[in-house]
Amino acid sequence: MSMETAELEQIAGQQIGSDSGFLWERLSDEVTECILARVPLSSLVRACAVNKHWKAIIRSSEFGRLCAEVRPSNPWLFVYCTNFLLPGKNQAYAYDPDAHKWYTIPSVTPPTHSRASMSGGVGGIMVATMGGTQSRLCYNHSLFIKKWKQTTEMCVSRDAPLVGFVEESGSGSNVSQKLIAVGGVEMFEDDDLAVEIYDTVLKQWEVTKSLPVEFRGNSSRHWLSGAVWNRKLYVLEIYSGSVASFDLCTKTWTLVQILRPMTPSGVKYAYLLICQGLLILAGVCHPPEGHVSFKLWLVDESVMQCKEMGVMPPEFFAMFAKGDGEKNVLGMKCVASGSLIYVYSVTPDAEYPMVVCDISKGWNAWQRLPELPSLGNRFDTMVGFCSSVTMNSFY
């Protein structure tokens, strides 16, 4: 029996009366940490206001590691809803899958940026271009943090790049993080397939091998989907299925292949995801004989072939496909992290349906998310990304 467990049992066996405040003072820091580590994350934020001692414990790096061990949490879904006519009506939300609850986030407007450039980056960030020639990026890992990070000027001006985020080795402020900007190049630039990498420690961009020519004409984030895994950035053209991967070690691209299910499935468009270390294709399909549906396929990276694993229940898919189903499902987007795959709609005239599949419980373990709170305002677009949340995500 550990010292913390023995102390907890000893105190639990005593009667807690009006002097319960004194009881907390008798606990060692180790026991206090063990108790607080089992408190839900949303309650920990309020617990920071109890006293300075608790605040110091909760915001320590050691406490963060303890929480990850005793109470691993599922990745949260963040959405940023934009009203182009009335920017003051813009609103951000965060969904806690463990509490099955939405939180409304106060003002999180990024620095002055191109309004239409806001997007969910690959690897758990939200990103936008900024600057007079849209030559810099601002990005954020958690919309609870009001201060956005900014890069130095890119080597190439971009208005709609696909941006991947990779966290590498190191500790503290020396953790090496990379941003990979792919495509989305302004028309006046010479190379419309330009790729460059930003080092957050060195604070500089490096131009590297351009996107393969097969992506020419479809090289913006509006046409591309990406996934980051094992120091590789996978890039998929969502309509044609053209796919290639960029190796951050060798800084080279693989040959372009066509990623589609082995059996005829009539894929209309699809996205690449990383979930539990698996490369997954998720998208809308309309087979020659059958109904429109949303399916999940497991990708064999070695041969770039995929096998069907699951399908969204018809009653959930119907929320995304009102009226002419094949026409109105063009607004479906999906993001993933951990074992969760979130699917949501960005169509303005929809009711913003959202569902999640937890593949750790099975490829057909779908659940509907609650409605967004205070949805009195109508939005022109919605951007989403998925990220793990710790106490550091709030500060």
Image: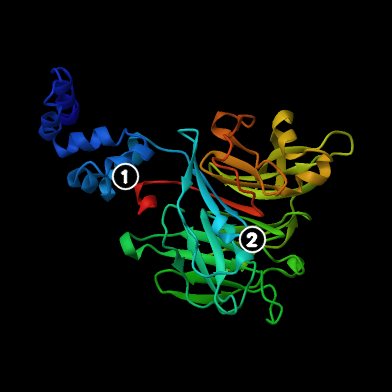
Q: Position of residue 188 (x, y in %)?
A: 70, 82
Tags 1 and 2 touching, CB below 8 Å: no
Q: Amino acid at mark 1?
A: Arg
Residue 47 visible within the image: yes
What residue does disc 2 label? 84
Q: Quadrant of the N terminus?
A: top left
Which sits earlier in the primary sequence, circle 1 or circle 2?
1
Looking at the image, is 192 positioned above or below residue 249? below
Residue at position x 34%, y 37% from top? 43
Q: In front here: 316 or 10?
A: 316
Residue at position x 13%, y 36% from top? 28
Q: Quadrant of the C terminus?
A: bottom left
Q: Is residue 125 left or right of residue 191?
A: left
Identify the disc placed on residue 65. 1
Q: How is the image coloured?
A: rainbow
Q: Position of residue 104 (x, y in %)?
A: 48, 45
Q: Is residue 327 left or right of residue 230?
A: right
Q: Is residue 18 left or right of residue 203?
A: left
Q: Write down the quadrant of residue 323 in the picture.
A: top right
Q: In front here: 39 or 67?
A: 39
Q: Is residue 192 left or right of residue 249?
A: right
Crowdedness near tag 2: few (<14), some (14–19) or many (≥20) residues, C-alpha within 10 Å = some
Identify the disc placed on residue 144. none
Q: Which of labels 1 and 2 is toward the front?
A: 2
Residue at position x 53%, y 41% from top? 276
